[in-house]
Image (cartoon, rainbow, N blue to C red):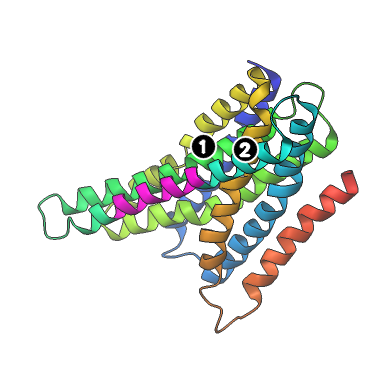
Amino acid sequence: MNQIVWMALIATLGTWSVTALGAATVVFFKSPNPKILNLMLGFAAGVMIAASFWSLLQPAIARAEAMPGTPAWLVATAGFLCGALFMWASDKVVSYARGRADNTQGQPNERLNRIIMLILSITLHNIPEGLAVGVAFGSLQNGSYTTEGLMGAITIAIGIGLQNFPEGAAVSLPLRREGCSRRKSFLMGQASGLVEPVAGVIGAVLVVYVETILPYALAFAAGAMILVAVHELIPECQQNQKTQPYFATMGIVTGFAVMMLLDVMLG
């Protein structure tokens, strides 16, 4: 296997391990500290927004300009919108699955259906996130293996990993409330993140061996990440805004600043 693909696999195994860590909260706690979760979500949102430009969109535009044919602005815009639309479609599938789960109340298989739908929704959500990490590492192929590019890819993986922690808890804790054992709740919670290494390897392989799609893939990953950050992470981390109006917001600013600092230092 190509070295870059191995790196993508290791990175996405790391993001999965954070999902497993979040799922493990069911073993030690009845519920995680919401203040810490909001800070983590805000930090992850800031990192993902900054990384979407410096580590994904900016390289996508540069590579598209170096390629003959389609204008760079069209490549970046089309890829970005396709990534956002893909994430939107995934969210629609998730919403449908959750709706099906709610409609099972009072039926004989209610508990089983709710568990299946919950795991399915989180698993589908993790596919584009794994692709984003895989594409970021796949872009290091063919002469672009620089310290700046490597740190950008690692930062993307860290940002996605941070927001995977509450996702793991979001699966395991409800399963526990549904009556599953702590062990079973943990196993099923961490299993929801196993799709990320698979999607990460697929994304890296496509970029490494089909170089012409790299600008589109980078912009695609940026669109998916921006939609996740703006539609899900930022609203989620602002739930306690009345009692702590700037706590999660400073997490967003700090995450953005950290990513910007890394880019300036390594640029």
- Report if the CB atoms under discs 1 and 2 are less than 8 Å apart: yes
Question: Which residue carries the number 1 mark?
Answer: 196
**Residue 138 place in picture, x, y as percent:** 67, 28
Label 1 sits on what residue type? Glu
10 Å neighbourhood of mark 1: few (<14), some, or many (≥20)?
A: many
Q: Disc 1 or 2, which lies upstream in sequence?
A: 2
Q: Which mark is residue 215?
A: none
On screen, residue 30 above or below 90: below
x 34%, y 54%: residue? 95
Label 2 sits on what residue type? Val
x 74%, y 32%: residue? 64
| Disc 1 element | helix
Q: Quadrant of residue 7?
A: top right
* Image side of residue 246 versus residue 26, left or right: right
x 43%, y 55%: residue? 27
Does the magenta-highlighted stretch encompass residue 11? Answer: no
Question: Which residue carries the number 2 mark?
Answer: 133
Q: Residue furthest top?
A: 1
**Residue 146 place in picture, x, y as percent:** 84, 32
| Picture quarter with the C terminus | top right
10 Å neighbourhood of mark 2: few (<14), some, or many (≥20)?
A: many
Q: Nearer the viewer, residue 31 or 122?
A: 122
Q: Residue furthest left?
A: 108
x 62%, y 70%: residue? 248
* Image side of residue 177 versus residue 38, left or right: left
For the record, the magenta segment spans: 85-98
On screen, residue 3 above or below 89: above
* Image side of residue 59 versus residue 129, left or right: right
**Residue 182 place in picture, x, y as percent:** 35, 52
**Residue 70 place in picture, x, y as percent:** 69, 30
| Disc 2 element | helix
